[in-house]
Amino acid sequence: MIKRVLITMVALMTLGLAACGHDDDDHQAKDQSSQTTKSSQSTSSKTAQTLPKQTLDQAWAIFVKAHPDAQVTSVKVDRETGTYMYEITGNVGTTEHEMTINGDTGETVQDEEDATDDNDPAIKRDGLKPLKDITTAATKKLAGSTATEWDLDTDNGQVQWEVSLQHNSGEHVVHVDAYSGVASDAVADD
């Protein structure tokens, strides 16, 4: 008789423990589902960062092929009507060449020249960080931001990118050294 009672008690306790363990699995599954939902919601609230299909090196090569004697003095990258465009400016003596290149196809959209008395310093191509690295450095300075425009030129002897960032709190600007990739803090763009 005592054996039967003990066996029955052990069986009931085993079932009870099994039920508790099963209940924990349900809570873990619900917790994981909740975390996945929160993660996908936070990801979807941020706009995905995109870049031109053509790299800076490719656009630079297109410019240099058309103007082999020109010294590049500035580069601007932005979206016009949904398409990224490179605007590269370079000088040969007193002539300024400004070329607009489709960032997706590499096609020359516009190529103009004007007389200039600007004495903007040339930017060395060798050692420039890729646009992807510049963008990463800039967006790390303001979590949840997306880069929307990039301007490369020389300011006070330093070659740097001015990267415009879009953020829930408004537009910001970060300056990134073009060769080292070191970025300044993000500041609100007035």
Image (cartoon, rainbow, N blue to C red):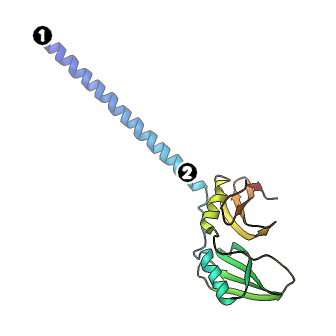
Q: Nearer the viewer, residue 88 or 83?
A: 88
| Residue type, mark 1 in image | Met
> Helix, strand or loop at disc 1?
loop
Residue 156 falls in which quadrant of the image? Answer: bottom right
Left of 9 or right of it: where is 178? Answer: right
Q: Which residue is mark 2?
A: 41
- Above or below, comparing residue 59 to residue 114 in the picture: above
Residue located 87% across and 83% down the image: 117
Badge 2 density bin: few <14, some 14–19, many ≥20, Cα 10 Å: few
| Residue type, mark 2 in image | Gln
For the residues labelled 2 and 1, say whether their Cβ atoms are less than 8 Å apart.
no
Q: Quadrant of the N terminus?
A: top left
Left of 10 or right of it: where is 38? Answer: right
> Helix, strand or loop at disc 2?
helix
Left of 189 or right of it: where is 129? Answer: left
Query: Which callout, 2 or 1, points to the residue nearer the camera?
Result: 2
Residue 97 falls in which quadrant of the image? Answer: bottom right
Q: Quadrant of the C terminus?
A: bottom right
Find residue 105 and report its horizontal and vertical position in percent.
Answer: 58, 82
Find residue 62 and report its horizontal and vertical position in percent.
Answer: 63, 84
Instruction: Estimate the spatial distance between the alpha carbons at disc 2 and disc 1, rounded to whole Å.
Output: 60 Å
Residue located 84% across and 79% down the image: 119
- Above or below, comparing residue 112 to residue 11 in the picture: below
Q: Nearer the viewer, residue 110 or 18?
A: 110
Q: Which residue is mark 1?
A: 1
Badge 1 density bin: few <14, some 14–19, many ≥20, Cα 10 Å: few
Find residue 179 and report its horizontal and vertical position in percent.
Answer: 66, 66
Q: Residue furthest right?
A: 117
